């Protein structure tokens, strides 16, 4: 960018006098700072030496650049009477996209852009020029040959613009396949990068892991959901990738069902999360329409379809021209509630279908408890000052039946596992289940003592309630529900010690063998 050209454009925008001089001096000083010069020693001669460019990272640079390129879109949209086809252009900072229905249109756009560059002494990186075409491949090759471009490098089957990977079939659900793959890959890359930069998931608290997942990884994976016309196969793959992150960060067993992992962590299935994003965008689209700003019909259609799937188009006011909109906060609150209700229905349907499934390696039979929406967040909030991060992670693993006990682990393997392979490694008298280890095994009597003391320390009414439970399975059920934070906290501490003891037994057996 030639600075003299920038000053001309600023004057055209009405920026003159002292304000213009201040911008010129500020731009020069910022440029000198990048060359390790002292701003206090800046003179007008120094200013004169800096004729090109603006400081990267400066708060002034974005607005100055926008002003500099503002007239380019105006020139693209200008056409004489002989031209029947407009030259629509989209621009965000230095990312320019030109849309045309013919090679002649693209040729004309290219000519306008190059003339503009010559006029204002601007340059374009030819390696950043990409052409996405639906048909007319030969014409596109003719264009690249004419301008000395490499057709293989310039003509793309898939094009990334502002983080959205699109192709010639972007108007159909199949056209979003590559975007879904790209977002999933980017999400997993960000997760593994966090690990390489020092995030130790085995030592992190469950709350920290879930906050990172909710605020970073899911946002990356579902980027562009407002316009994403997806297929079920695309969102199912994203669900599996999200569940994989959850299972690694919380140290859950790899065979933990995807649906359970999402539900336990209050994560909306990808398809529902995308519909929620569209439903939120619906309000903005309707407001734009009311203000007279044209909105693409396909965007309106996508948002309305999302409301249909969420089940709330039946509200009469949604299909009318509104004069009284809910405010943004209220609308988002409503949409969030609809998404949770849709997720609840989806999870209940999955749970019921799997409960009748004979395959015990993937269904609810693996789980020791059926979670409710919001359970985990409530526990994390409640236990924040009462339970450590490791104990919280242990609590979630116990709810998922994935603490590494023999009887529970064999369920995830093949059917017909020999009975002796499920026996407790400490007492060898019963199957090594969580209920047995935590509440019955004689070898863990010492580690279990704090649990019994905690029960007897409860107020009389609560204590009597706990003493009424008839068997270990009932007691375990209430521990995993978090009925009494004190009991749950104590039980998780004891479980940690019991698992350490089991590990020691295993190592001794291996040494003797």
Image (tube, rainbow, N blue to C red):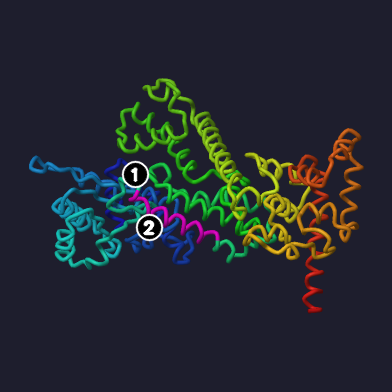
Q: Is residue 49 left or right of residue 384?
A: left
The answer to whether 398 appears left or right of 197 in the picture is right
Give above or below for 144 relative to 16: below
| Magenta extent | 174-191
Residue carrying label 2: 54
Residue sitting at 81 percent across and 74 percent down?
Answer: 508
Give the quarter of the figure containing the N terminus.
bottom left
Residue 17, disc: 1
The image quarter in which residue 275 lies: top left
The residue positioned 47% from the left and 53% from the top of the image is 237
Locate residue 434, reporting x and y percent: 76, 54
In front: 227, or 269?
269
Across and down, in percent, residue 203 comes to: 70, 60
What is the secondary structure assignment of the residue under circle 2?
A: loop
Q: Is residue 177 magenta?
A: yes
Q: Residue at x 49, y 27 (%)?
A: 327
Tell which residue pokes out farthest to the left in this image. 82
């Amino acid at each position: 960018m030639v600075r003299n050209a920038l000053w001309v454009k600023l004057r055209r925008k009405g920026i003159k006098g002292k304000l213009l001089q201040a911008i010129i001096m500020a731009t020069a000083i910022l440029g000198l700072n990048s060359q390790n010069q002292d701003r206090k020693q800046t003179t007008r001669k120094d200013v004169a030496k800096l004729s090109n460019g603006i400081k990267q990272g400066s708060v002034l640079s974005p607005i100055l650049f926008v002003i500099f390129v503002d007239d380019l879109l105006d020139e693209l949209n200008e056409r004489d009477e002989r031209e029947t086809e407009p030259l629509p252009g989209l621009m965000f900072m230095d990312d320019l996209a030109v849309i045309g229905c013919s090679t002649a249109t693209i040729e004309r756009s290219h000519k306008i852009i190059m003339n503009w560059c010559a006029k204002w002494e601007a340059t374009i990186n030819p390696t950043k020029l990409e052409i996405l075409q639906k048909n007319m491949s030969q014409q596109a090759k003719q264009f690249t040959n004419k301008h000395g471009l490499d057709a293989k490098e310039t003509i793309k089957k898939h094009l990334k613009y502002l983080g959205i990977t699109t192709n010639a079939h972007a108007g159909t659900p199949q056209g979003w396949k590559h975007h879904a793959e790209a977002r999933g890959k980017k999400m997993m890359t960000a997760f593994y990068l966090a690990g390489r930069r020092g995030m130790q998931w085995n030592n992190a608290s469950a709350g920290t892991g879930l906050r990172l997942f909710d605020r970073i990884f899911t946002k990356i994976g579902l980027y562009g959901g407002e316009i994403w016309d997806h297929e079920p196969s695309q969102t199912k793959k994203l669900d599996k990738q999200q569940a994989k992150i959850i299972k690694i960060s919380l140290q859950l067993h790899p065979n933990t069902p995807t649906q359970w992992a999402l539900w336990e962590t209050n994560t909306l299935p990808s398809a529902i999360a995308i519909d929620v994003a569209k439903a939120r965008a619906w309000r903005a689209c309707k407001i734009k329409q009311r203000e007279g700003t044209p909105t693409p019909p396909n965007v309106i259609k996508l948002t309305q379809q999302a409301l249909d799937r969420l089940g709330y188009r039946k509200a009469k006011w949604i299909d009318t021209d509104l004069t009284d909109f809910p405010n943004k906060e209220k609308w988002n609150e409503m949409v969030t509630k609809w998404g949770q209700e849709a997720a609840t229905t989806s999870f209940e349907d999955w749970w019921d279908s799997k409960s009748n499934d004979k395959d015990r390696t993937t269904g609810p039979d693996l789980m020791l408890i059926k979670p409710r929406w919001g359970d985990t967040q409530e526990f994390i909030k409640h236990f924040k000052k009462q339970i450590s991060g490791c104990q919280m992670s242990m609590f979630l693993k116990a709810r998922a039946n994935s603490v590494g006990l023999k009887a529970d682990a064999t369920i995830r393997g093949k059917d017909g596992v020999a009975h002796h392979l499920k026996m407790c490694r400490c007492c060898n008298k019963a199957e090594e289940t969580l209920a047995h280890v935590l509440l019955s095994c004689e070898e863990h009597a010492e580690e279990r003592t704090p649990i019994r003391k905690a029960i007897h320390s409860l107020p009389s009414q609560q204590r009597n309630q706990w003493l009424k439970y008839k068997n270990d399975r009932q007691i375990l059920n209430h521990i995993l529900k978090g009925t009494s934070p004190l009991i749950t906290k104590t039980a998780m501490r004891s479980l940690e010690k019991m698992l350490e003891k089991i590990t020691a037994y295993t190592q001794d057996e291996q040494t003797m063998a």
